[in-house]
Image (tube, helix red, strand yellow):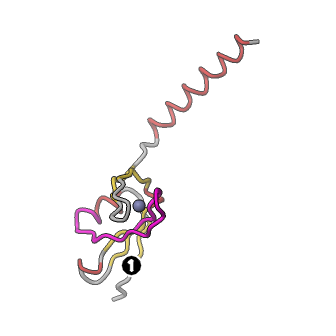
Amino acid sequence: MSESASSGVGMSVASAFAGMQSVAPVVFRAGCPECRGRFELAASALRLAIGATSRTTFYSFTCPACGASVRKPAGERVVELLTGGGVRTLRLHTP
Ligand SMILES: [Zn+2]
């Protein structure tokens, strides 16, 4: 009984590891100015808003610790990182 259970665990660990190799998890480091916590957030937890200028281009997320809505300016490098990582992008500027 215990023998079959342990072999089942071994199988699931092997398949989980294979899944991690094929789909690399992308995480972004972000800090919360409200509670000063630092987190690693998945791409799905972040949103990017691209405005007409760099001043109106920012990314936002909800702090997992205190629930604050955090908004930070996003420079060109950050925009590249976020879009490349699969973060949802909203274009505020309509030409
Ligand atoms: Zn916070």
Q: Badge 1: few (under 14), some or many (20 or more) residues near its Cα, within 10 Å?
A: few
Residue at 23 percent across and 62 percent down: it is: 77
Whether residue 14 is situated above or below residue 29 in the rendered picture: above
Q: Which residues are magenta?
A: 60-79
Q: Is residue 76 left or right of residue 10?
A: left
Question: Residue drawn 41% across and 70% down?
Answer: 89
- The quarter of the image holding the C terminus is bottom left
Split into 4 quadrants, where in the image is the N terminus? Answer: top right
Point out the residue furthest to the right here. Answer: 1
In this view, 30 is above or below 60:
above
Q: Is residue 87 magenta?
A: no
Amino acid type, callout 1: Arg
Judging depth in this view, the residue of 22 and 37 nearest the camera is 37
Front residue of 48/64: it is 64
Q: Name the secondary structure under disc 1.
A: strand
Quadrant of res 73: bottom left
Quadrant position of ligand 1: bottom left
Where, by quadrant of the figure, is residue 92 drawn?
A: bottom left
Where does residue 64 sit, x and y in percent of width and height? 47, 57
Q: Which residue is mark 1?
A: 91
Residue at point 38% right, 68% down?
70
